Amino acid sequence: MFDLNGKTALVTGATQGIGFEIAKVLSEHGAFVYINGASSEEKCKKASEQIKNSAPVRADLCKMSDIDAMYEKTGDVDILVLNASIQYKRKWNEFTEEEFDAQFNCNIKSTYYLIKKYSPKMMEKKNGRIVTIGSVNQYNNHPELSLYGVTKAAQMKLVENIAPSLAPYGVTVNNVAPGAINTPRNTTALSDGDFLKKVEASIPCGYVGTPSDIAPAVLYLCSDEARYITGSEIIIDGGMHL
């Protein structure tokens, strides 16, 4: 099961955290994986060195020119996992225009353009897997993540709108929504004992998840075994959205 031999994947935001674990698991199941990151080529290379059958490909997804350049490097892929995102924590009326644009450009605009860029060949081949990575903040009203939550809710709506158009061509489009996950993005906050207890109290399962809780679901959705699932979502949050 979950045999990805002969498949090529692109995972955005894959130099650390959830994206890194997804890339690692896809590789372990046979896929050749392109490791994308925005900050530096060196960081992409270091991540790729830890994952067999992979190659680094730096691109700032807020820039359409970088998306085009990345496509020229990767060529068409069989699996597209859109994990990269930008998150600023502010009260709803404290975001700057630059922070607003950065979150929407990375979390929504790039999702649209990457799917538009990579889906035609999938449609031609009558096979493809696209998975976006959402967030429990699609459902929860976090006092400092209002814009981030809006972008992730919009991303899910994009999945629902695109999926019916690609389904007749054997291309599925789904979303995975993680809850509180122990990643580098959250390390500082979760290292505060009082804050950690507060977060854990909001999770029915009682603990913060890890990237290894997320990657298996993405693997499933990228496999042939999930061919009959599209326009759907798997929420992996220990019940936090409830």
Image (cartoon, helix red, strand yellow):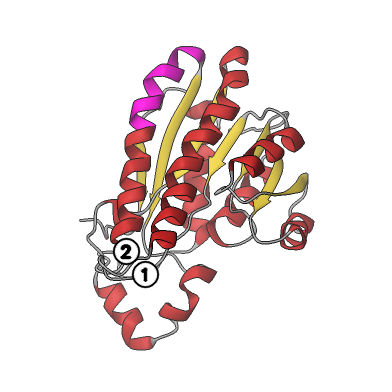
Magenta stretch: give its range.
159-169
Which element carries disc 2, helix, strand or loop? loop
- Front position in the image: 1 or 215: 215
Determine which residue is flagged by label 2: 145
Q: Are marks 2 and 1 in contact (CB under 8 Å)?
A: yes
Residue drawn at 51 percent across, 59 percent down: 211
Say which of 195 and 121 sits in front.
121
Residue at left 20%, top 56%? 242
Magenta: main secondary structure: helix
- Left or right for 138, reference 28: left
Disc 1 target residue:
89
Residue 229 picture quarter? top left
Q: Amino acid at mark 1?
A: Lys
Looking at the image, residue 21 sits to the left or right of residue 228; the answer is right
Specify whether residue 87 is painted magenta. Answer: no
Q: Name which residue lies at 61% across and 62% down.
A: 16
Task: State the image coordinates of residue 20 (x, y, percent, origin top left).
Answer: 62, 56
Quadrant of the snapshot with the N terminus? top right
Q: Amino acid at mark 2?
A: Leu
Residue drawn at x 41%, y 17% is 165
